Amino acid sequence: MSALYLLAAGAASAAGAAATSTVSATATSTAATGTLESIVTTVVPSIVASALPSAVTTTTPVTAQPLFLPVWFEIAATFTGALAGGMTAVRLRFDITGLVVLAVVNGLGGGIIRDLLLQDYGIFALDQPRALLAVLAAAAVATFFYSAATKLRPGLAIIEAFSLGLFCLVGSDKALVAGLTIVPAIMLGTVTAVGGGMLRDILCDREPEILRRGSLSATAAVAGSTTYVVLATWLNIAKGPAMIAGAAVAMVLRVGSLWLGWESPEPVDLTPVVAAVQGRVVRGSASIFRRTARRGQHPDESADDGACNPPADRPGDDAPP
């Protein structure tokens, strides 16, 4: 019995030691992971905060207060988008119904898609009568004053670029306030800025402008949303400075595409380049292997091989002198 008792005690001790080592390894791994996470989420933002003025940074959670735009800007941006949709309908010779539909879609479509996806704040375009009134006013201008509206295109392009920059920020901020993470917030900001134009082009049975080379509208929206979300969530920058930075990035890209001809890059097929590099690597490796094999042959081995295999007798060696 004593032997059995000692055997059981030894097994229990071994099991306890194994469990202790497992827990220790797990704790070490967790500590390492936690250290890396703390560096990314705490150390880097603290370094940035220490390098910036205190008025720029904040400790207020990003979900505490949503971002609001001035009423006059909301009306101007909605009017500009709706006017662009209405003018497209006039150029395509749509009737009044088609003109109003394109004006509503181009002016309010992106916000409607965003609010439908969030399902948290209601539909802004339906809750705010001023948005619908701005759309109807733009439709009336496109219907009766098309030639006069075409002369305002340079100014409208500036307003459109400015509204794209700010609308992508509003969409991203609403997603953050709703509790979404960084990537969904960037996606919703982009949809808010360019969703209306995409729906307009689909209704007109043509390639969406955001998919064509040269517009940079979607690229500008993604860049502006990313700038705002990263600054506001990761680096703890106040929403005001983050909004200015994000809007500036989006506006520079959009205006550069309109006035300076900036274009997004086209896809490049790198298969021939990779295949050529791979072929050179294989041939070089084979050449190195052959040279190494030759150098590895010892001279004594060559002499031994000659001694073991004497040369054959030449004809006439057995003839008498």
Image (cartoon, helix red, strand yellow):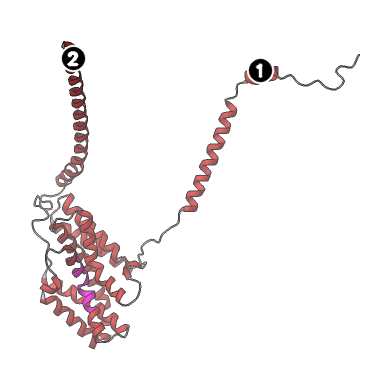
Residue 111 forms part of the magenta stretch? yes
According to the image, label 1 marks what residue?
A: 304
According to the image, label 2 marks what residue?
A: 4
State the residue lying farthest toward the top. 2
Percent position of residue 220, x then y: 27, 63
The quadrant in which residue 70 appears is: bottom left
| Relative depth, front residue between 82 and 16 | 16
Tell me which residue sits at (18%, 44%) in the image: 41
Q: What stretch is highlighted in magenta?
A: 102-114
The residue type indicated by label 1 comes to: Asp
Tell me which residue sits at (56%, 29%) in the image: 292
The quadrant in which residue 198 appears is: bottom left
Percent position of residue 24, x then y: 19, 28
Asked if 304 appears above or below 216 in the picture, the reply is above
Asked if 167 appears above or below 9 in the picture, the reply is below
Tell me which residue sits at (58%, 26%) in the image: 295
Asked if 249 appears above or below 151 in the picture, the reply is above
Magenta: main secondary structure equals helix
The residue type indicated by label 2 comes to: Leu
- The C terminus lies in which quarter of the figure? top right
Mark 1 near mark 2, Cβ–Cβ under 8 Å?
no
Percent position of residue 113, x then y: 21, 68
Percent position of residue 266, x then y: 40, 61
Residue neighbourhood size for the residue with mark 1, other residues' Cα within 10 Å, grouped as few (<14), some (14–19), many (≥20)? few
Real-space Cα separation, disc 1 to disc 2, in angstroms: 67 Å
- The N terminus lies in which quarter of the figure? top left
Residue neighbourhood size for the residue with mark 2, other residues' Cα within 10 Å, grouped as few (<14), some (14–19), many (≥20)? few
Q: Is mark 2 on a helix, strand or loop?
A: helix
